[in-house]
Image: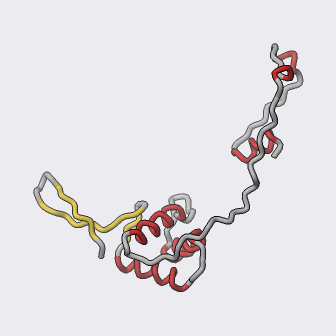
Amino acid sequence: MSHIFCWTRGNRFCKLAAVKVGGQEIDNKIMARIQEVIDGNPGMSRVKLSRRICEELRWRSRNGRLKEVNCRKALTKLHRDGKIRLAEAGRFEGKRKPRREPERVSPEAVTSGVLKDFQPVELVVVSSGALVNKVVFDE
């Protein structure tokens, strides 16, 4: 089991605590299971590996979602510390759309005045950034 040395002042004794990453206690048994998943899935991306490991170890947050980000952080930390072996991180080949520059509005096109001069006005409740981009920027 991996341990961190902790000094407690009050009682003047040493206490050994298990390694924790992202609130998850990780011992040698868990590290061995993680390494088995890694070795059993060569070429799998770190995102997919983290999902698989979270499912195997039942690492979920309170809302039931997999703790994928914490898992990737744990994998990176354990790899850097020499506790597990990870393949080199692949280059991200995401399918993001190229960012579009917003249209420039000439100062003459900007109007100001009293709200009643701009009737009818419609208020739209927007709860996500993607929806803001769609409604406001027509993306």
- Please identify the residue farthest to the top as the structure is shown: 114
16 sits to left or right of 68? left
The residue depicted at 80 percent of the width and 32 percent of the height is: 104
116 in relation to 65, above or below: above
15, 73: nearer the viewer? 73
The residue depicted at 38 percent of the width and 75 percent of the height is: 83
Q: Position of residue 44 (x, y in %)?
A: 60, 77
- Please identify the residue farthest to the left as the structure is shown: 12
Residue 18 occupies quadrant: bottom left
Q: How is the image coloured?
A: secondary structure
Q: How many marks?
A: 0
Q: Position of residue 42 (x, y in %)?
A: 57, 83
Q: Position of residue 13 (x, y in %)?
A: 12, 61
Q: Position of residue 65 (x, y in %)?
A: 57, 62
44, 57: nearer the viewer? 44
Q: Quadrant of the N terminus?
A: bottom left
9 in relation to 136, above or below: below
